[in-house]
Image: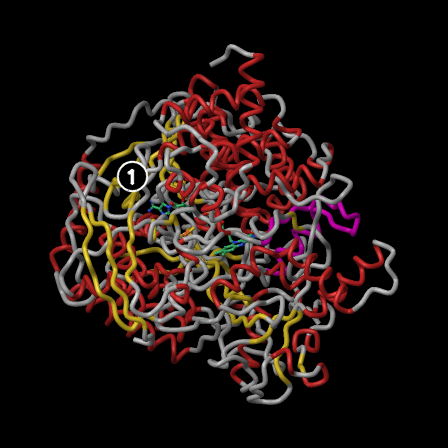
Amino acid sequence: MEGNMNLSLKVWRQSNKDTAGGFENYNLDSVSPDMSFLEMFDVLNEKLVVEGKEPIAFDHDCREGICGSCAMYINGRPHGPLKGVTTCQLHMRSFNDGDTIVVEPWRAKAFPVLKDLVVDRDAFDRIMSSGGFISVNTGNAQDANSLPVPKEAADDAFSAAACIACGACVAACKNASAMLFVSAKISQLALLPQGQAERSIRAEKMVAQMDAEGFGACTNTGACSAECPKEISMSNIARMNREYIGAKFSSTAV
Amino acid sequence: MATSSRLDAKIPQGPLETKWSKFRSSVPLVNPANKRNLEIIVIGTGLAGASAAATLAELGYKVKAFCFQDSPRRAHSIAAQGGINAAKNYQNDGDSIHRLFYDTVKGGDYRAREANVHRLAEVSGSIIDQCVAQGVPFAREYGGLLSNRSFGGVQVQRTFYAAGQTGQQLLLGAYSGLQRQVGMGTVQMYNRHEMLDVVVIDGKCRGIIARNLITGELERHAGHAVLLCSGGYGNVFYLSTNALGSNVTAAWKAHKRGAFFGNPCFTQIHPTCIPVSGEHQSKLTLMSESLRNDGRIWVPKAKNDNRPGNEIPEEERDYYLERRYPAFGNLVPRDIASRAAKERCDAGYGVGTSKLAVYLDFAAAVQRYGRAEANKNNIHNASDVDITLWGKAVVKEKYGNLFDMYKQITGEDPYEVPMRIYPAVHYTMGGLWVDYNLMTTVPGLYSLGEANFSDHGANRLGASALMQGLADGYFVIPYTIGAYLASEIRTGKISTDHEAFVRTEKEVKDRIDRLLSIQGKTSPETFHRRLGKIMWDKCGMARNEKGLKEAIAEIRQLREEFWKDVKVMGTAGYFNPELDKANRIADFMELGELMCIDALDRNESCGGHFREEYQTEEGEALRDDENYMYVSAWENLGNNKWELHKEELVYENIKIAQRSYK
Ligand SMILES: Cc1cc2nc3c(=O)[nH]c(=O)nc-3n(C[C@H](O)[C@H](O)[C@H](O)COP(=O)(O)OP(=O)(O)OC[C@H]3O[C@@H](n4cnc5c(N)ncnc54)[C@H](O)[C@@H]3O)c2cc1C
Ligand code: FES
């Protein structure tokens, strides 16, 4: 192998949802600083296979910071030490030779651990199903340029829509609140003219589903936004609160 | 040459321009009450699958959708960067449906079906309308209207985009439509499920066997039609720009149950990717083609010039694409740009430590944009420092996320030094053979998106895969599926107790048990890496008869070794990603052989398929239209034996020419 970093890893192992888990220690030598964090895990897993041990399960797919699959809680921080970077885009040059690295899954009541570092994030999909859309059937649309959208609104909507639903916000929050995730979608659609028709009902339904899933309350600590790999802004939460209060004021739907 | 009697492309009669509209108004319809009793299984929730599942559910069909990720929103389409084409002609620069059609057929080096491509161009505009209505935040100009940019092989601006995250925004749009249907109960979503076989009864596709990846249980699902929207197979090369989970298993199982495989050897190698840095590498990262709007590609004029890029003076640089292809310059199509990079590196002009890289340089763009900003703000004596600062800000707005990604991976800052890039496997034009209705050679089994072979010939133009995926799902299959389902209204509910379901499930189980029982010494990953190396060296950017023959022998050997020596840890009874991986690699090892066989059959160079024996004096691809103007559709005969069937390509609306971008 090509590198010269030696690491001690403390990794959470848990066989399934119903059994208790615990930390296991692994030593890994000759890690290259150019490896990504997940490539370091690949090397560790290959080593485990050769030793006849079961490899560590973790979610990942794109390895480009966009699919939102990867989710490791590294040394007490979701996605590790760098700001604006997912686990898959984190590289070993951000660590030092001789470091001990502690790796855990997301911890939240609404995200049960399925195995090792893999958690169940279906709650996010259910929140989306409750109202995270514009009701437009295929074929209903008018010509795209018949509805100008001010550049600023489009840019702000895009910034909110950049959320990858990894769940780092929930993992970072001491209350395991999902407000940043939910508010990003509500904001995106509230900022666009296309989203106006369902604006109130959307906020009401999505918030109701979020509560039903068992996510905690928001106490405005801001850890979610600080740890978000896509740097989704706290201002979305303020906007969502305005939307929600406005909706509740005028409707009795939910 | 005549088309094989086993292939009927079902292309509607009549002039090209009216084929689709006539088809739409004459295709049989299924009434709403009957739709409720017809079940459709959709494998995949990328752009093709999500758009198809949502639209079919809106129409009233009962839909089940499957993906192996933990959420449909994480399908590989999410990673598409640069943009999506549509013939809107918003820029008034001469675009039209015909021009998009023509560019696509020419870009594909005259190996795509005219009727399909024309339909794609016809529906392209509606895709943009649909996405905007869903709230997809495309880039806009100050006047509030949509912005466009250019992609390779094209002289108009028809690409719509959302920064470098177009795939993400389009998929989230399609996903929101899908989740809406899930919420209404019209789509049942099965995430973390992997389809491991299709079930065929009396010659018709009637369902699938899937593995619940969490519990490990095998499940039977019946449907009146099955849509494979399972993406491309670029990961047969091990290293590619695809997401790590992307695989061929769904398509391959269908192939083994009777679906012919079209043009398997047509692979796209993308010119601008971050070069390989070491053994540990698990994937390659694309730097979007959109960067070629502003980046200039060059190598030093002198061999083995070891100075850092930004210290090499202007007159000692060779902007080889601008030199060789003045008409299209840095925006030549991908196959041509990739080969040109390889040519320079092979000739000893490569840069970086590995010498397998060329520069993609933004310094000129920064200056140009900086000066434009100064002019816009009426500042006529701006300092160089300010101009550079403003120019960088404009570049950041256009490509910021790509520049960040580059810096994160390489540790170098592309705002200061030119990017180093090299070609990498990116997309597969080949896939399941489908007719005009997107149906495979198995009745009731369809294929959409990258998983089919249909629209891109031997080379895909940039920003056309997203267009095709959404065209197939939103606007094509909802119509064409009626042609088949109208005759299925009397079938009634299909029982999963049928002997074919039982037998197929047992075959799936036996294979899993076999994989787990070998308990050899070598990890699945190691086999995958070795397969990838064979494919890249011998069936990659350049191919020749000798290499392909060697590759076939080596793959057979490797496959044998795999089934004797692979070590798969864990059990089948629970979440086991190692097992999933081994299962996929086993299929890649069969596909790899077919790709080499196909490449060997095609004694010509076209698009991404470059046979070294067939090139012009200037090193351009040399087609042989007389003998190879066909789609190769391979029938699986079992035991890794195949028979070739040919679909002749007929061009009635386009004049065939040697493809020139000079
Ligand atoms: C990095 C990158 C950037 C790109 N940028 C662009 C671009 O700018 N413009 C453009 O036009 N194209 C681009 N492309 C190409 C384009 O993204 C893809 O061709 C396209 O998104 C494929 O969409 P799809 O719906 O066919 O398949 P995918 O998005 O790959 O989806 C496949 C789906 O099938 C599911 N699946 C697969 N097998 C199984 C199975 N056995 N069981 C259950 N589910 C299964 C997966 O879970 C997934 O949901 C890019 C590609 C890459 C790699
Ligand atoms: S693996 Fe996709 S975001 Fe990390």
In the rendered structure, does residue B199 fall within the stretch colored magenta?
no
Look at mark 1 in the image and give the residue it sits on: B208
Secondary structure beneath dot 1 equals strand
Total numbered labels placed on residues in the image:
1
Type of the residue with mark 1:
Ile
- Between B620 and B580, the one lying in front of the other is B580
Q: Could you say which is closer to the camera, residue B231 or residue A47?
A: A47
Residue B527 in view here: yes
Estimate the x, y position of residue B556 in percent, counting from the top left. 26, 69
x, y percentage for residue A12?
Answer: 23, 50
Along the line of sight, which residue is nearer the eye, B552 or B404?
A: B404
Callout 1: residue from which chain?
B
Which residue is at a point 79% across and 48% down the rendered structure image?
B92
Please report the residue visible at 66 percent of the width from the left and 57 percent of the height from the top.
B103
Q: Could you tell whether B76 is left or right of A192 in the image?
A: left
Please give left or right for residue B262 compared with residue B164 in the image. left
Where does the image place residue B262, in percent across and percent down from the top left? Answer: 43, 56
Which region of the structure is painted magenta?
Answer: B82-107
Please state the horizontal and vertical placement of residue B259, each as a whole percent of the image: 36, 49
Closer to the camera, B385 or B514?
B385
* Apparent side of residue A65 relative to residue B141 in the rendered image (left or right): left
Residue at (45% x, 40% y) in the render:
B49
